[in-house]
């Protein structure tokens, strides 16, 4: 039985992914800052651990308790909507601490285990904002784009050692807690000059039909975890899949000023 450790399992994509792997018979180590076993069906194959990816001692303790794992899924992240002008640099650094440095810290901690065994898979969850420009998420986009480059380079570095590295790129998922998780950071981030523009953007998002479901992401994470090829990117959700098409790559991908997405 294979073992997967997933970060950020308290809600959204992480929670659904943990449930998905569990249903398929994997041994699942679901981690979150405040453990909640009640989120999952009772199972002898489940272990819920405390893990804060911004704290090295928390990472070390969780991995020590978890024991050998086959797949690491770096899903933990925080979202942020707001005008960059109104975003304090302390908030930007907070976003990077989780979305970027947290992922790097998890990889740094697990690589020796995988290298020694000559096997293992790292799946880093980013976002479709890395595929096409989107307004009011500049800091978030930067934090996720950094992981795209990091992961692409790391894949070359570890492949010769028998370690696989993958990216899963979810699209826009309004049913997740992306906005809720970052709510305390968003106060005052849409100042007057940006209000009309922001209303149009949010209105456009509310009308989007091709959006990403938690189940879409769980499926792509599972595919990435089991893929034995050199394939790097796994877009998740109808909108992300559309944006990832070769004909939709480049400067023509944008969000219109009325808020509607164009691929």
Image: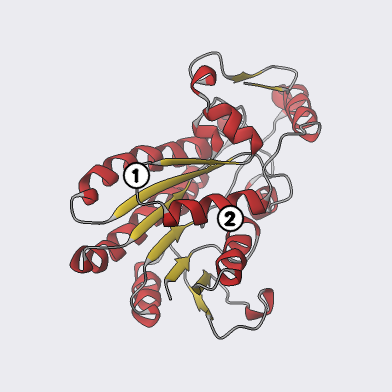
**Image side of residue 26 versus residue 232, left or right:** right
- The residue that mark 2 highlights is 218
**Residue 104 image position (x, y, % from top left):** 34, 53
Q: Please tell me whether mark 1 sits on a helix, a strand or a loop.
A: helix
**Residue 73 image position (x, y, % from top left):** 45, 59
**Residue at position x 38%, y 82% in the image:** 65
**Image side of residue 179 versus residue 161, left or right:** right
**Image side of residue 243 versus residue 56, left or right:** right
Q: Observer-nearest residue: 81 or 236?
A: 236
- The residue that mark 1 highlights is 151
Q: Are the residues flagged by discs 2 and 1 in contact, CB closer than 8 Å? A: no
Q: Residues within 10 Å of mark 1 (few under 14, many from 20)?
A: many
**Residue 216 image position (x, y, % from top left):** 63, 48
Q: Earlier in the sequence, mark 2 or mark 1?
A: 1
**Residue 144 image position (x, y, % from top left):** 46, 41
The residues bearing labels 2 and 1 have C-alpha atoms spaced at a distance of 19 Å
Can residue 184 be seen in the rendering of this structure? no
Q: Residues within 10 Å of mark 2 (few under 14, many from 20)?
A: many
Can residue 227 be seen in the rendering of this structure? yes
**Residue at position x 32%, y 40% in the image:** 152
Q: Please tell me whether mark 2 sits on a helix, a strand or a loop.
A: helix
Foreground mark, 2 or 1, reads 2
**Residue at position x 46%, y 54% in the image:** 98
Q: Colour mode?
A: secondary structure
Q: Observer-nearest residue: 38 or 232?
A: 232
Mark identifier at residue 237: none
Q: Quadrant of the C terminus?
A: top right
Q: Residue furthest top?
A: 252
**Residue at position x 70%, y 30% in the image:** 191
Rendered position, 145 above or below 250: below
- Residue 242 quadrant: top right
């Amino acid at each position: 039985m294979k073992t997967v450790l997933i970060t950020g399992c308290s809600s959204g994509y992480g929670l659904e992914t943990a449930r998905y792997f569990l249903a398929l018979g994997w041994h699942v180590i679901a981690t979150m800052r405040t453990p909640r076993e009640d989120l999952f069906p009772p199972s002898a194959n489940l272990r819920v651990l405390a893990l804060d990816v911004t704290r090295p001692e928390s990472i070390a303790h969780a991995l020590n308790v978890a024991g050998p794992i086959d797949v690491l899924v770096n899903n933990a992240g925080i979202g942020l909507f707001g005008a960059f002008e109104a975003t304090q640099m302390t908030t930007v650094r907070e976003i990077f601490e989780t979305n970027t440095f947290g992922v790097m810290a998890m990889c740094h901690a697990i690589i020796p285990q995988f290298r020694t065994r000559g096997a293992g898979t790292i799946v880093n969850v980013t976002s479709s904002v890395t595929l096409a420009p989107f307004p009011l998420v500049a800091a978030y986009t930067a934090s996720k784009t950094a992981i795209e480059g990091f992961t692409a380079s790391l894949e070359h570095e570890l492949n010769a050692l028998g370690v696989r590295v993958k990216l899963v790129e979810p699209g826009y998922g309004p049913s997740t807690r992306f906005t809720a998780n970052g709510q305390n950071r968003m106060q005052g981030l849409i100042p007057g000059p940006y209000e009309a523009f922001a209303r149009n953007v949010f209105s456009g998002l509310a009308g989007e039909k091709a959006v990403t479901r938690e189940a879409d992401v769980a499926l792509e994470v599972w595919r990435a975890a089991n893929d034995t090829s050199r394939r790097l990117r796994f877009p998740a959700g109808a909108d992300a899949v559309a944006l990832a098409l070769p004909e939709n790559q480049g400067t023509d991908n944008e969000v219109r000023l009325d808020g509607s997405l164009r691929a």
